[in-house]
Image (tube, rainbow, N blue to C red):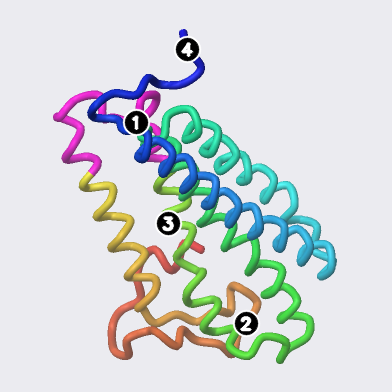
Amino acid sequence: MSGSAPLSADRPLVTVLGGRAGAVAAFCLITSLYVVAVLLTLLMGNPGWLLFAFAMYTFPALGVLIAFRRPRNSIAWLCLAIGFVWGLVAVTEPLLAYERIHPGFLPRPDLVLAVTGPLWVPGVGLIGTFLVLLFPDGRLPSARWRPLAWLSALTMVLVSTGMLLGPANYADHGFPNLENPLGVKGSTPSPASSLF
């Protein structure tokens, strides 16, 4: 077997190189998120997130390796997306931990909580559904699996939107006086918002 997939009429060199360059650029962005997260975690004195950050960093590392070899494989891009989502969480967690100790450090901790709170949904959802459904070649096993894929995507969008726009108090996050600034007044809280 050769070192990379052969080029053909439906797989021009520009597409292959563009996919690889995009994957490397995404990987560099994600790596910078994790570096910032590790530095913030060490500076803020909250080393509990380091193990989680290193575990989640395996996804983008694997993604860039797959994308370099097979740029059109969906698994590569899913792994990069999973790494990006958890990288955002890893950056904001030490900042929020520091804000709990030193109030006023972040100008809008309520907004940070509102935006990053629902990020666990695609992080877990992509791992638990699409990574499993598309493994190993980046395609669904058959067309019969499409409804499940659509249902999974719709569920992730609805739960994330419900958490983002639902009224919430952040007492369980250590901020008893903060409420979701994006929450629609008069709506009922999302059932998913009570989970985390």
Q: Does residue 180 show up magenta in the picture?
A: no
Secondary element at tag 2: loop
Residue 42 shown left or right of residue 49 in the figure? right
Label number found at residue 138: 1
Label 3 crowd (10 A; few <14 / some 14-19 / many >=20): some
Residue 170 shown left or right of residue 104 in the figure? left
Mark sitting earlier along the chain (3/2): 3
Label 1 crowd (10 A; few <14 / some 14-19 / many >=20): some
Secondary element at tag 4: loop
Q: CA separation, marks 3 and 2?
A: 21 Å
Label number found at residue 175: 2
Return the residue at label 3.
121
Return the residue at label 4.
2
Q: Amino acid at mark 1?
A: Gly
Compare residues 85 and 152 and report the one nearer the observer: 85
Residue drawn at 45 percent across, 67 percent down: 194
| Residue 5 x, y percent position in the rendering | 40, 21
Q: CA separation, marks 3 and 1?
A: 21 Å
Mark sitting earlier along the chain (1/4): 4
Q: Which residues are magenta?
A: 128-149
Q: Amino acid at mark 3?
A: Val
Q: In the image, which is nearer the foreground, mark 2 or mark 1?
A: 1
| Residue 113 x, y percent position in the rendering | 54, 76
Q: In the image, which is nearer the foreground, mark 3 or mark 1?
A: 1
Label 4 crowd (10 A; few <14 / some 14-19 / many >=20): few
Q: Residue furthest top?
A: 1
Q: In the image, which is nearer the foreground, mark 1 or mark 4?
A: 4
Q: Is the C-beta separation of discs 3 and 1 under 8 Å? A: no
